[in-house]
Structures are given as C-alpha cells and as structure tokens.
Image: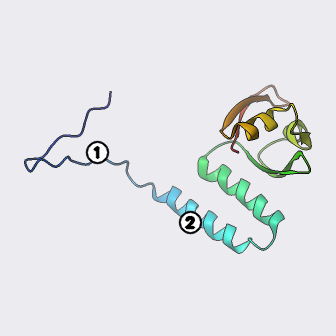
Amino acid sequence: MRQPPQATASGAQAAPPRAPLDALRLEQFIDLQRDLLVSACDPEILAERLVQGATLLLRVNGAAVGMVADGRYRLLATYGLGTEYRAQYDGQSLQDSTVGTALAAGRPLVLAFLDGDATALRTLFLP
C-alpha cells in the first residue's frame, strides 16, 4: 500500500523515495543511443541494432521491429526469436489481423505466441 507523502514543518511535502540508479543499465542505454546514432544512415543496420539493444537493455528474451508497407506488416529485424515468429507476423495483411487491430486501436496490445518448443512468448505491439 502506498502512503501519501509526509508534510514537513514548513508545510512542503517530502519527495517520495527514488529507486537507486542502476549504473550498468544506464551505461547500456547510453551505448544503445550511441550505436543507433552511428548506424542511422543504414536502415537495415539501425533496425538490427535497435532490436538487439532493446533486448539486452530490457532483459527480455527477444525483440522485433516492423513497419507497415502497402497494407502489410513487415518485420525489419528480430533478435532472439525463431523463424516461426517471423513467419507468424511478417507479411500479414492489416485487414482482419491482430497486427491491424493493434495499429487501428492506437494503443498497445499484448498477444501470446507459442514458439516451436511450445514456450509461450508474449508479444507487445506498440502502434
């Protein structure tokens, strides 16, 4: 249960305690930013570095980045995900698809995906 901030003698409210700074994650974030800026001239390399960096920074098993082209969702790059994952989403028409639903709604959508080894992966679509 979260308690309200305590007032000081002057009547001002004390700031809530902050989480300690994670120096390693900050360093990883700065490295990711630098890598993205360096590779910004080549879209293919940019997409690959983005998904790899996001995977490591967020400490998740894998990541993917895609875009919409000609009414279809195209995966630009994946990291830590099998070919089955790419086959599930790459080239999917936006009409009557989960990807289209997520993008049309304009809000994040979480989907379950069974990988080839029957391990459930959660996919977060961010429009």
What is the number of the mark on residue 82? none
- Quarter the C terminus occupies: top right
Q: Secondary structure at mark 1?
A: loop
Residue, x 65% and y 39% (percent of image)?
A: 107
Dot 2 or dot 1, earlier in sequence: 1
Q: Which mark is residue 30?
A: 2
Residue at 65% across / 43% down in the picture? 60
> Image check: 125 left or right of 81?
left
Q: Is residue 54 left or right of residue 24?
A: right
What's the residue at 45%, 54% (across, down)?
22
- Residue ranking furthest to the left: 9
Say above or below: 108 vs 50.
above
Quarter of the image where one finds residue 21: bottom left
Q: CA distance from mark 2 to mark 1?
A: 26 Å
Q: Is residue 51 above or below residue 16?
A: below
Q: Amino acid at mark 2?
A: Ile
Image location (x, y in percent) of residue 82: 84, 41
Using a 10 Å C-alpha cutoff, classify the residue at mark 2 as few (fewer than 14 neighbours), some (14 to 19) or many (20 or more). Answer: few
Number of marks in picture: 2
Residue at disc 2, secondary structure: helix
The residue lying toward the viewer, choosing from 68 and 37, is 68
**Tag nearer the camera, 2 or 1:** 1
Along the line of sight, which residue is nearer the eye, 77 or 100?
100
Q: Is residue 4 left or right of residue 67?
A: left
The picture places residue 88, in percent across and down from the top left corner, at 88, 36
Q: Amino acid at mark 1?
A: Pro
User: Mark 1 packing: few (<14 Cα in 10 Å), some, or many (20+)?
Assistant: few
Where the N terminus falls, by quadrant? Answer: top left
Q: Could you tell me residue 9's position as x and y percent?
A: 7, 47
- Name the residue carrying label 1: 16
Residue 28 in the image: x percent, y percent? Answer: 57, 60
